Image (cartoon, rainbow, N blue to C red):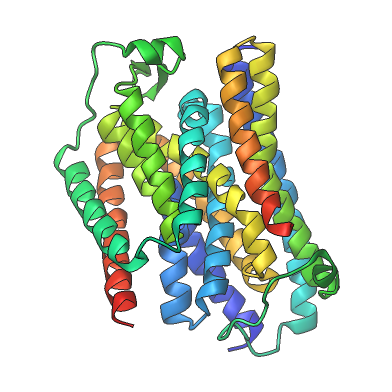
Amino acid sequence: MSVREFSLVVFLISAVAGFLGSLTGLGGGVVITPVLTLLLGVDLHYAMGASLVSVIATSSGAAAAYVREGFSNVRVGMFLEIATTLGAVAGAHLTAVVPGSALAVVFGLVLLYSAWNSFRNLEDHVAPEPDPLATKLRLDGDYPGPQGRIRYHVQRVKAGFSLMFGAGLLSGLLGIGSGAMKVIAMDQIMRIPFKVSTTTSNFMIGVTAAASAGIYLHQGYIDPGLAMPVMLGVLAGSLVGARKLIGSGTKALRWVFAGVVGVMAVEMIYGGISGGLK
Amino acid sequence: MTDDRMDLIIANLLRTGVILAAATVAAGGVWYHFEFGADPVTYKSFHAGPHSIHSILQMGHSQLLILIGLLILIATPVARVVFSLVAFSLERDWVFVWITSVVLAILLYSMVAAWW
């Protein structure tokens, strides 16, 4: 395949990745890495670099729209970022002592369960009482609904924060985006409305990914020729995805989320088992 | 400074960064395709290894231009955190000034640590 044909194929796949990534708050890596490695025969290191670029592009591309429309909760994002970035740094240092393949299988099963859970409770939970810590940190907010803005209270701030540390730890250990755990923690533990959870996750993953960018650049994982169609494709897709999310109902978004997380879980379990057999 | 005003500025900051990055990468991409568009693809095996600033500067000029665009893209979320720090200071929300400073410190540490 020539560089020109290859770039066109990668651009189109990346557009799909950016679309799904911005709708679900998971970033584009779920689609990019397996397609590049399994279908196009790209080496895993380059695929990881491309995936990192896709996460930052999805995040920044869609976040502009989400923040402006008042979906992303900037305070919640900032507060939880401490936990995820600290977790990621700790995880990156633990890779030598923790068996990654076994962990991938366990994490895959957790994701499968969460996908099932998200799918079972299609309606948003409404929390009547504010958490005192959320009030103190001014985390509660509102977001645009079909009939004006809807107010919500953030619940179980401490539990959510701890789970975010775990999400960061796993992403550092397994080298995968922690977007899924972020959305799950905000949606199912902290009882933040689903659209706010995914868009806040989308806002956060750019920062978490930027933290790894230094290492990836240094190791030569980011190849400009490959990153170029990935970035442009993902951006195009994420802009379309952001528009779509604003007009979509929570139920439909949960369906897409459960589907993408399910695929991610299977990828992870498969990778863990095949990696463990080597 | 209110939270709503901060949101608007963050949104514009992100959009400006993304447009600038995309334009630079696209320009580098067109140039790259004039030079190498007809060549076969070579991503089957990994042959880069650790880079230094020096080895990066030896890349082809079109690739370097794409890389500059990617650096703008990577810098965009960092700039967003820096701006949040300023905004929370103006709001005199000291808890969040502290939270944002910690995030920024970890972020900068992990970006730069690999190069030493």
Residue at (61, 12) in percent of width and height? B2
Question: In the rendering, at what x and y percent does residue B14 appear?
Answer: 65, 38
Question: In the rendering, at what x and y percent does residue B75 appear?
Answer: 70, 46
Count of picture labels: 0
Residue at (69, 28) in percent of width and height? B83
Taking the image as shown, residue B90 lies to the left or right of residue A141, namely right
Question: In the rendering, at what x and y percent does residue A228 appear?
Answer: 66, 66
Viewer-closest of A113 and A58: A113
Taking the image as shown, residue B105 lies to the left or right of residue A129, namely right
Viewer-closest of B61 and A245: B61
Q: Quadrant of the N terminus of chain A?
A: bottom right
Q: Is residue A150 at least partly visible in the picture?
A: yes
Question: In the rendering, at what x and y percent does residue A200 appear?
Answer: 45, 34
Taking the image as shown, residue A212 lies to the left or right of residue A118, namely right
Outermost residue on the left side: it is: A120
Residue at (37, 43) in percent of width and height? A166
Residue B3, relative to residue A55: is it above or below? above
Residue A246, relative to residue A223: is it above or below? above
Residue at (82, 64) in percent of width and height? B53
Q: Quadrant of the C terminus of chain A?
A: bottom left
Q: Is residue A24 at least partly visible in the picture?
A: no
Outermost residue on the front side: it is: A97
